[in-house]
Amino acid sequence: MKRNQKRKAHTKTKIKMENHIRLLSDITSEIYDDENIVTSTSSEQVEVEMMILKMFKFFECKASIDPNMPKLNRKLHSKLLNSWLLTLPKSYRCLEASRPWLVYWILHALWLLNDLPDTKTLSNVVEFLSHCQHPDGGYGGGPSQFAHLGTTYAAINALCIIGTDEAYASINRKSLNNFLRAVHGVDGSFSLHIGGEQDIRGAYCAVTVAKLTNIYTDELFDKTAEWIVSCQTYEGGFAGCPGMEAHGGYAFCGVAALALLNRTQLCDVDALLRWCVNRQMRVEGGFQGRTNKLVDGCYAFWQGAIFPVISAIYSQENKDVVDKVLFNQGALQEYIIICCQSPDGGLIDKPGKPRDIYHTCYTLSGLSIAQHGTCTGGSVIVGTTRNELNPVHPLHNIAPNHVYNAMAYFRKQE
């Protein structure tokens, strides 16, 4: 009885698979048309589509026997992620300068699956990240490494996920402030490290870190919004730098940073929406990162998280579009659950690719966005309710309560 009451308490729309799975006869009519001009790009696209159509066909056969399909292999993913947190395969040696990223990706994925490690393990993580904190501010890719905005963002997010006083107190906010000022350019851009390249990722990482730790000031982000807007391209998306090509990850960083700066009115939101909706693939259901590129599971977040941000912007502007679903949430979930789960745990870019920590994190994040990122406030769950993940804050890619708890803690420090 309690279980039924709990389910009714949440406004959820469980999609019946027999009513929602796109019939193969309908999908095949959407297969890529190379117009008799074969290129390496068109050949790869057709190859991926055919591979995915075979997987959908195989799934239909299984779903006709098991009505609970498709299933998210939660236990397999959790088991693998917990093992990765303690011991990484030798192949990850090349990511020696990305260790806070690995910690964040694993912890966030485990949070999504509602299976964070025990208190002692999390305390050990806090201690490790403390060794990655540079004396002059920010976090490096490992102990004794130079500070970098990317790994600073990853470390702060990981500590906010842990969310203990020990985790919060380990952050040196004064030196972090100094580091952000040191990488802030006179044109409003941010270098990823002192003397490093400037791109839109730096601006996003700087503003989200500053907001979470309550060191944000208008002076620190002088001209930043204007520089970000200069990265919006003729397509509508955002590039890494002015004059470059629009890209899913950069587009997310651009609009999320503008939202955090409360300056979204400076960009062309309609053009961004048009660009984003055209990145969802007709056959696959997932997103591509750029025009004429292949589908990739990680863009389920990078592209998918843009839609709730746009919905919020339109809501503030009182536009009628806010009561409409801006992308096909069911199709995205089908692509992830049917095509992106590795049999032994972990998630992948696309069929035929190996599993890795990065894609496990961002593909699960995208699945959460597809489930919870609706404008109506309800949830759209493909398969049974056992597939439901914890929700994420679309601007920070950690849980909403992790964001609010961190902000509340650091406000008290003032």
Image: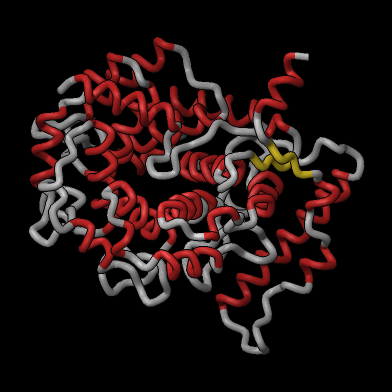
Q: Residue furthest top?
A: 120
Residue found 36% across the figure and 28% down from its top: 404
Q: Is residue 261 above or below residue 243?
A: above
The quadrant of the image that shows the N terminus is top right
Most foreground residue, 366 or 65: 366
* Drawn side of residue 88 relative to residue 323, left or right: left
Q: Which residue lies furthest to the bottom in this view?
A: 36
Q: Residue furthest right?
A: 65
The quadrant of the image that shows the C terminus is top left
Q: Where is residue 171 in the image (x, y as percent from the top left)?
A: 21, 25
Most foreground residue, 105 or 311: 311
Q: In this view, does 341 lie above or below 37?
A: above
Q: In this view, does 345 lie above or below 239?
A: above
Residue found 70% across the figure and 29% down from its top: 386
Q: Position of residue 110 (x, y in %)?
A: 51, 28
Residue found 35% across the figure and 41% down from its top: 95
Name the image quarter holding residue 33: bottom right
Q: Where is residue 11 in the image (x, y as percent from the top left)?
A: 66, 34
* Drawn side of residue 361 relative to residue 184, left or right: right
